[in-house]
Image: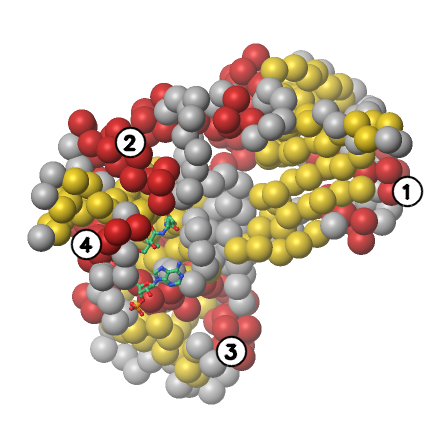
Amino acid sequence: MVTLRTGVEGDYDEVNQLVQRAFLNDTAGREWDEERALFEPGRSVLAVDGERVVGHVGTYTRNLTVPGGVLPAGFVTVVAVAGTHRRRGLASAMLTRQLGEIRDRGEALALLWASEAGIYGRYGYGLASRRLSFEIDRREVRVDGSRFDKSRLDGLRLQAGPAAAHRAQVADLYEQARPARPGFASRDPRWWDYRLADQAWHRGGAGPLQAVVCLDGDTPVGYALYRFRSSWNDSGPNGEVGVMETVAATPAAYTLLWDYLLNVDLTRTVGLWLGALDEPLQYLVNDPRRLGMRMGDGLWARLLDVPAALRARRYAAEVDVVLEVVDEVLPGSGGVFRLRGGPDHAACEPTADQPDLRLDTATLAAAYLGGNSLGALAAAGRVDELHPGAVATTAPAFTWTRAPHGMEIF
Ligand SMILES: CC(=O)SCCNC(=O)CCNC(=O)[C@H](O)C(C)(C)COP(=O)(O)OP(=O)(O)OC[C@H]1O[C@@H](n2cnc3c(N)ncnc32)[C@H](O)[C@@H]1OP(=O)(O)O
């Protein structure tokens, strides 16, 4: 008989074996130091068959940036069920229990990256951000100097080297940028160990992790993390630059960093898999079509305490609306709520007033980070307009200056 239990410290190795098998990974030669340090056993739900671990869902404790605010969230991870025990409801049982536990800790939302996009909608998760990936034929693309005032680059310089050598500068810059970008997550030292992990298997056939830091005088104002992949063919050099993340405090720093990344001798391709939907690069180059952009799904969000989540963010325009939120998985998390918000305030409480809009919790989650328009969701039939005109007055408030950006898989 399969039962569920909370994880304990000694579970890591068996859980990890289960997870690696479920993800079809070849584990030969891999060490797990960075991943092990992130394991929060008391936040894991395990399915056990006798002594054997046959299922697992995990949660990390981190803070998430939302439009105009930062809030604690449950970062859901390593969901796996043994091949011998699938399609009998184990993942559903673990994921539902986990959502209740996250809510009981006072975290207003859960967040995850989905291995397959068909899995999580049934549990009330909505696709809250999308990513733009780039595969750039770098010889065809250049930063277009005619599009900006080149004098803004005066005084900037670059330093490049192994990422570990630049860790302090990179972490400081990320920390400065984090509160302003919805989708960014807090990174304590364990998360930096994980982010900068550089064993052979982390490299995926490319070289060691590199950093390039942009300095204004002596002040760091931006960085990029990347790897080179050396390659040659009959025509000569065919190397790649694989960009992991770029963070810049100013447009000038961003411009100089990309100019550097696009101009590495002996490379032909520059790739960025987890770019933002509003990645400024697309507005900076001579030939955006050659950036090889493709859209994919990003962060999935699940609201657990609707009023707390709606109070935690700010709104691009003044809004006063009554929302009926339908939650069939966790009925206690749904209800009718009045939201009053604006660029510098937000209040949200249950109300007995008549709703203006009715939507399910996954639809509200999809709009929550500002990455999807309520108008577009309404056009898909996912929002019922109970008060004429309520979509048009509410939708602008839920947008934000920048698109939500999930820059790292957790
Ligand atoms: C946040 C993350 O970690 S994402 C990683 C998810 N894990 C993986 O992809 C690893 C490989 N896959 C697995 O380990 C398992 O197949 C899991 C965890 C995805 C599902 O586990 P199961 O115990 O089989 O799921 P369970 O039996 O509870 O099924 C729940 C529902 O999800 C559906 N489902 C399961 N897997 C998938 C899928 N890959 N795509 C679409 N639907 C799926 C089932 O059909 C079922 O639907 P229903 O409610 O309409 O009947």
Q: Amino acid at mark 4?
A: Arg
Number of the front mark, 2 or 3? 2
Q: Quadrant of ligand 1?
A: bottom left
Distance of label 1 from label 3 (alpha carbons): 40 Å
Report the residue marked by disc 2.
39
- Chain-order first, disc 2 or disc 3: 2
Question: What secondary structure is marked by label 1?
Answer: helix
Residue at image location 76% in from the left, 47% down from the top: 291
- Chain-order first, disc 2 or disc 4: 2
Residue 261: give x, y in percent of width and height: 74, 30
Report the residue marked by disc 3.
380
Report the residue marked by disc 1.
146
The quadrant in which residue 26 appears is top left
- For the question of whether residue 173 can be seen, the reply is no
Number of the front mark, 1 or 3? 3
Distance of label 1 from label 4 (alpha carbons): 56 Å
Quick one: label 4, few (<14), some, or many (20+) residues within 10 Å? some
